Image: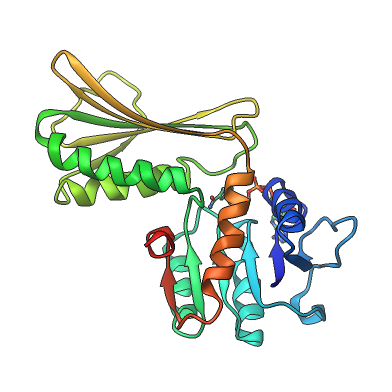
């Protein structure tokens, strides 16, 4: 498989290049403001002249138009791993998925998807009798907050609660008493933390905590490469980790 990589010079881009090498996958080109040392890098998709079977994107929401234009011009699948898309961007992604297969996940790790499944089960059992809070921690260079993964967990908890959750992002002030059905979401930023997420179900005299720690970026890189392989030959639609792990 040949892959074109958006964000090739970033932290995740470098992890994908290194993991691809180990799995015999060829990264034939990339898109970035900063060129890669050994792989042709472009800043204008009209100049892209390398072969590829799939696109992987670990960059910023601002590159979405370029990702879409390239995927449409080559009619090839796209794995979107970038986080922080707004509603307008999400609508563009839905439109793209009518033409080519699109894999989109705010977290490409298998373990995180197990956490989400456990959080859904715990919510069904405990929502009415507990206060649920989500806490995430990431490195000090992350620009979006809360993380795309925390949003995924919050959406899954909300759905499992029967759409009862009222999202509360952090707390400050003198009128912050918790209300029934509040779902607290908190972001910690510091150092080189790769990614920590926990969901707390706080009850009278006991707390159940479900926690996932990413110990290296390789788990996301491996997930993205697997997703690209999974998409080859699929029909146009939006796919996620649940589809791949079935
Ligand atoms: N889905 C997942 O599992 C997962 C895991 C980790 C990170 N992420 C997301 O992936 C994205 C990248 O993360 P990172 O840690 O590698 O960030 P990073 O800042 O290290 O890398 C981003 C790269 O994109 C390039 N870039 C940014 N804007 C650009 C533009 N307009 N045109 C061309 N290139 C541009 C930068 O030069 C940089 O090389 C973030 O959105 C992050 O939240 C997702």
User: How is the structure coloured here?
Assistant: rainbow
Is residue 191 placed above or below 108 in the rendered structure?
A: above
Is residue 52 placed above or below 26 in the rendered structure?
A: below
Question: In the rendered view, does 35 fall on the left or right side of 53?
Answer: right
Residue 35 location in percent, x, y? 85, 58
Residue at left 47%, top 43%? 147
Residue 53 location in percent, x, y? 67, 78
Residue 151 location in percent, x, y? 38, 47
In front here: 152 or 141?
152
* Residue 61 visible somewhere in the drawing: no
Is residue 137 placed above or below 144 in the rendered structure?
A: above
> Please, which residue is most extreme toward the right here?
37
Q: In the picture, which quadrant includes the N terminus?
A: bottom right
Question: In the rendered view, does 33 fall on the left or right side of 108?
Answer: right
Residue 103 location in percent, x, y? 49, 67
Total count of labels: 0
Residue at left 73%, top 49%? 10
Residue 82: name its quadrant. bottom right
Q: In the picture, which quadrant includes the C terminus?
A: bottom left
> Please, which residue is most extreme toward the left here?
128
* Residue 168 visible somewhere in the drawing: yes
Question: In the rendered view, does 30 fall on the left or right side of 230?
Answer: right
Question: In the rendered view, does 234 fall on the left or right side of 71?
Answer: left
Residue at left 75%, top 55%? 17
Residue at left 21%, top 43%? 121
> Please, which residue is most extreme toward the top here?
205
């Amino acid at each position: 498989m040949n892959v074109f990589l958006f964000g090739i010079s970033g932290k995740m881009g470098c992890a994908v290049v290194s993991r691809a090498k180990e799995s015999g996958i060829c990264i034939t080109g990339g898109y970035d403001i900063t060129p890669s040392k050994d792989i042709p890098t472009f800043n204008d998709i009209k100049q892209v002249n390398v072969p590829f079977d799939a696109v992987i994107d670990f960059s910023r929401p601002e590159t979405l138009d370029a990702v879409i234009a390239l995927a449409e011009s080559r009619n090839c699948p796209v794995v979107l791993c970038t986080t922080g898309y707004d509603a307008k961007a999400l609508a563009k992604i839905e439109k793209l998925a009518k033409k080519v297969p699109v894999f989109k996940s705010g977290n490409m790790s298998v373990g995180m998807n197990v956490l989400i499944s456990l959080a859904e089960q715990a919510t069904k059992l405990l929502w009415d009798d507990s206060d649920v809070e989500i806490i995430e921690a990431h490195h000090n260079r992350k620009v979006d907050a809360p993380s795309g993964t925390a949003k995924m967990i919050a959406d899954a908890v909300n759905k499992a609660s029967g759409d009862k959750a009222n999202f509360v992002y952090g707390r400050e002030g003198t009128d912050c008493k918790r209300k029934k059905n509040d779902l607290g979401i908190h972001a910690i930023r510091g150092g080189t933390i790769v990614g920590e997420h926990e969901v707390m179900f706080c009850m009278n005299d006991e707390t159940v905590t479900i926690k996932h720690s990413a110990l290296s970026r390789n788990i996301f890189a491996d997930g993205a490469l697997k997703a690209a392989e999974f998409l080859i030959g699929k029909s146009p639609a939006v796919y996620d980790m649940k589809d791949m792990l079935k």
